[in-house]
Image (cartoon, rainbow, N blue to C red):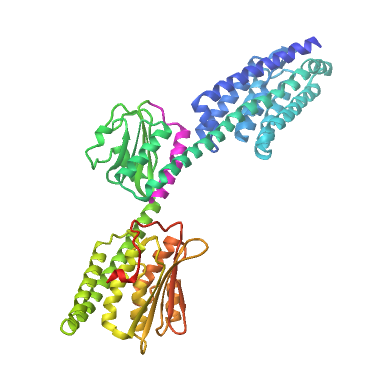
Amino acid sequence: MFLHLDKLLAVFDRAALMLICLFFLTRAAPFRQLLQKDDYTPAEKLTVIVIFSLFALFSTWTGINVDGSLLNVRIIAVMSGGILFGPWVGISTGIIAGLHRYLIDMHGVSSIPCLITSILAGVISGMIYQRVDKSRRWSAGILCGMLCESLTMLLIVLFARPAALGIEIVSEIALPMILGSMSIGLIVLLVQSVEGEKEAQAARQAKLALDIANKTLPLFRQVNSESLRQVCEIIRHDINADAVALTNCREILAYVGYGEEHYQTGNISLSPTTTLAITSGKIIIRNNDEAYRTRDIHSILVIPLREKGTVAGTLKIYYRRAHKITGSLKEMAVGLSQIISTQLEVSRAEQLREMANKAELRALQSKINPHFLFNALNAISSSIRMNPDTARQLVINLSRYLRYNLELSDDETIDIKKELYQVMDYIAIEQARFGDKLSVIYDIDEDIACKIPSLLIQPLVENAIVHGIQRSQGKGVVTITVRKTETCGDVHISVRDTGDGISEDVIRRVAGNEMPGNKIGLLNVHHRVRLLYGEGLCIRRLSPGTEISFTVTKDVAAKPPDQRQFSPENIT
């Protein structure tokens, strides 16, 4: 019993030595990177085969001679390699270890049994890698290792001559070698713990990338040199880099960190490394080099940024120390660059949409102004001799109307009362044209208080007059309603006329975001209202006439600075 205990301890000593060597290997960056990969190059496969083959050969060399056989941990090395790295390691290591064991003692009692079971152990370990869930490989390795060692003992008895010699050998080494197979489980668990660290690290890197994305997202809503500098500063701070830069395909857009003084002249041209990354579309890593302008920087990571699949710039990360660009940092930076690429693309689309909206609004304004100018001048001209006071008031109305349009900014929100004053100036001019044919009813809460974008109500009133009242026979009435809703404090705005009624085709086209004939103002207001308040215009055909309405939601509306009492008389 004590003899068996000594041999068992000897087996565990050698297995522990292998375990210690693997532990130190997992601390080394190159081997650690091998463990963190799923696909291997031929050179990497050869490296792993050499490592585990050396473990197996060392096990044979350090084996204890027992009556012509060797007490060793060769099977542990073979099976560990196959379970951890797959059949190509297990089988190759098994063949190398088995042939070596056979060749050093070709006529030994256990040479052929060890050759057979070494190769078989490699095959079985590869099968475990392919067919057993990763979480259960360690236990499968222990079980199969014990079976392989048991098979070795059986073959020794069968091949030994005389048989009594085989039985004597097995009685001494069977128990230590079979129990020693438990070390396979320890080795597999050790290396898998490193892989677990890989997954945990990947999760940390993903979280870091998402945190950076969340911090930088608001800055991409308005892309300019200052916002890009803030993006670089956030990235530099969160990943502890010495410097970070963003470029387009021609120049550096922002640079923050060490050596910043070299990039403050504006329109800085790109370095050869950045140009290479842009032209090749590949990630460039310089882990022991000098930066183009800052010689103290020795680690450089350049990642292409893409828009619609085309390289549009780069994200550059710098460290002053060499070999700071690790595999995990690269993976995190790649994920971050993809997020930045998406944010830039969305920002560009948003800017294009905003430009289109502004262009549409300008088109709307340019269309309105000449139209009113022509009609107002005609009305003023016809009133000068017959009714000078009316002409004088129309001049005031026209000047206020033109000033209002000229002073508008594209994205200004204004007091709804100011918008209504402008609407009343417009109506005063139109009433001078139409006379008794046009009547206007104002149904407006006196204490109404909110802000809206300019030119939301006036185009609806124009539509009611020009396309409703003007085309109808007889007199017409336009009713403008602005009231707070009783339940939630929203502001409901509607413009109703008693004209011939809007066509169903126009209603359908506006709802489908199609241009309804010459009604650019109607579609523009529909787009803007839907963008701001979630729902577009509500258009209803009445009998007679048309009603167009929308709601300014409480969350978007704001208290105006002007708290004057509002009434239609204020416009005169």
Magenta span: 322-344
Mark yes or no: residue 124 visible.
Answer: yes
Q: Classify residue 2 as left or right of residue 274.
A: right
Residue 496 or residue 246, whichever sits in front: 496
**Location of the C terminus (image quadrant):** bottom left
308 to 71, vertically: above or below: below
Q: In the shown orientation, is residue 405 left or right of residue 539?
A: left
Query: Residue 502: which quarter of the image?
Result: bottom left
Q: Which residue sits furthest right?
A: 164
Q: Is residue 343 magenta?
A: yes
Is 340 located above or below residue 259 in the figure? below
- Nearest the eye: 395 or 231: 395
The outermost residue toward the left is: 385
Residue 218, placed above or below residue 414: above
Residue 276 pos. (x, y %): 32, 41
- Residue at figure coordinates x 24%, y 64% from the top left: 406
Q: Is residue 57 visible?
A: no
Q: Is residue 248 left or right of residue 511?
A: left
User: Residue lying farthest bottom?
Assistant: 473
Magenta stretch: residue 295 in it? no
The one of 433 and 128 positioned closer to us in this rendering: 433
- Quadrant hosting residue 251: top left
Q: Count every numbered label the image shows and give the total.
A: 0
* Percent x, y of residue 340: 41, 45
Residue displayed at 75% across by 22% down: 178
**In front: 389, or 173?**
389
- The answer to whether residue 149 is left or right of residue 432 is right
Image quarter where the N terminus lies is top right
Instruction: State whether residue 155 is above or below residue 306.
Output: above
Main SS, magenta residues: helix
- Find residue 236 and report its horizontal and vertical position in percent: 38, 34
